[in-house]
Amino acid sequence: MKKKLFLVLSMLCVLGFSGCQGTDTEEGRTSTIYVDSQLTETPDVTGEPEATEVPEATEVPEATEAPESTVTPEATVTPEPTVTPEPTVTPEPTVTPEPTVTPEATVTPEPTVAPEPTVTPEPTATPKPSAKIRELFPLAEGVELMWSEGGVIITKKDGLYGAVDETGEEIVANKYTSWWVEPNTEGQFALGSEDEAICFDKKGNELLTICRPSSVYINENCITYSYMEYSEEENADGVYAAIYDLEKAVLQTYTQTTTRISAYRVTPVMEDEFYITWKGVDYADIYRVDRTTLKQERISSHWNRRLFAVNGEYGVASENGWYFGVGLLSKDGSEELMVDINELLKVCDLDVENYSYWPEYFIKEGQHLYNIGKQMVLGLESKTDNKEYYFLLDFTKAEVEERELGTAEYSWIEKIVSNPEDVVVTVKNKIYLSESGNYFASQDDDRFYIDAKGNIIADFADCSEFVGDYALAIEEDGMAYVVDKKFQKVSEGYPADRVYASGNVLCIEKGEQTRYLYVTE
């Protein structure tokens, strides 16, 4: 009897134990964790991938490794608490995973807000490292800055010219009445008087003295010039041309055997070549000279044509004889693109009969250049009301026809553009070319920039020509800023009334004070 009673009690205990174990397993599978007031279901230890959804955790790898504490299964696996029903009601060990809650620091949004300084526009108004701009030393009272390039600054004091370096130290004293040549990238320049030009290097050492010059240029370590030469022979006086090679210390002069022929104009050496225009009584010949061989080669012969300078494949020439013309001449003389100025005025509806004209130049590395590719600017002034017009010309679509000019006794054939309406891009009060692609222009009281097609691309209260990749622009608040080619500010603001460029120096006028920003490329 006792044995039967023992067996019955044993079976009842086994059945009761198995039922309690199953209830603990089901209730212990899930728990809730509160992070940032958001309820998230965390399926036991398999909930670890939740941390990979928080982007901040990729910046702080330690926080993603912290959940290892949730892998410790001792609290949920240990069977001791399951013998009694209390652990099933109080799952505190699994609900309080403090180590997993600590990643709150990575959830906080501050790290994502921190990059805001890169979005705010203020940095565009502070200098960029690529903008090689610094303020020049203040000039002494009564001293004017005239031009700057190659570490040399031409100055003027009491009507006399001199030069200083970038630190303000004197290179050449202010004692010359004439300023002949702007400094080039090597810092070579020329000062003197009406009858004499003295060429200097950037330290103020004299390189060459030219008597009775009519034009002087210094480039590629060569000095090219024209000068008056007197002769005891009748009608033998004339203007001659010469080149002085600074590297070889060799002087070569050029003359024409025919009397009454003068060097009408010379150009600077560009890519080891320069040009001489010889002018006679009824013709003008243009010769190309090779710097190495020093030999002349005639490339053009016309009534009264002269070549100003060559830039790339073309140079700018003018015609002042049986017609008034301006245009391009290829460097070998094979292509002539000359337009009649009177026809330009007609297609632009400008009633100007008596005028003077000139091709407008810009300065690059101390050299006077007149074209960028097939584009140039023609300047014209009415002698009636002194009003100026600047024509942006593009000869890309120019068509040329042959015309007979002259008289019944003496005539010749000229090649002249037949479609001037396709050559004129725009006409303004002022236009200055720039290799930046942004051409300074003005119309009445407006100052702005145009592109190669004549479109206005930016306008300001006032602005300067571009110096390399930079220019000055005054906004409506009266503050001047240095801007890049995209017209983004790269400097702090300066109070300004007027801005302009002088060589590679940007100048800011405010009242009687002028500040100079020195630009180096």
Image (cartoon, helix red, strand yellow):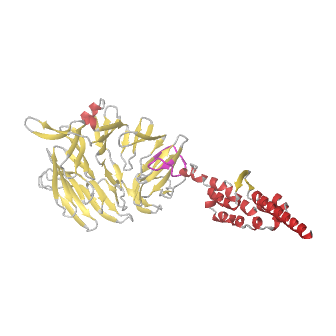
Q: Is residue 399 above or below residue 194?
A: above
In the displayed image of the protein, which residue is found farthest to the right? 2
Magenta residues, start to end: 481-499
Apparent side of residue 146 relative to residue 102 in the rendered image (left or right): left
In the displayed image of the protein, which residue is found farthest to the left? 409
Quarter-wise, where is residue 241 in the image? bottom left
Q: Is residue 337 above or below residue 169?
A: above
Location of the N terminus (image quadrant):
bottom right
Residue drawn 90% across the image and 67% down it: 5
Apparent side of residue 137 relative to residue 54 in the rendered image (left or right): left
Question: Where does residue 350 sit, x and y in percent of width and height?
Answer: 31, 30
Apparent side of residue 136 relative to residue 266 in the rendered image (left or right): right
486 magenta-colored:
yes
Question: Where does residue 94 sit, x and y in percent of width and height?
Answer: 77, 61
How many numbered discs sit on the rendered protein?
0
Apparent side of residue 363 relative to residue 116 in the rendered image (left or right): left
Q: Main secondary structure of the magenta part?
A: loop
Residue 157 appears anywhere in the view: no
Residue 112 vs residue 104, the one in the foreground: 104
Question: Where does residue 268 sit, x and y in percent of width and height?
Answer: 27, 56
In the displayed image of the protein, which residue is found farthest to the front? 1
229 magenta-colored:
no
Residue drawn 25% across the image and 55% down it: 212
Residue 173 appears anywhere in the view: yes
Residue drawn 48% across the image and 54% down it: 517
Question: Where does residue 246 sit, x and y in percent of width and height?
Answer: 28, 65
Location of the C terminus (image quadrant):
bottom left
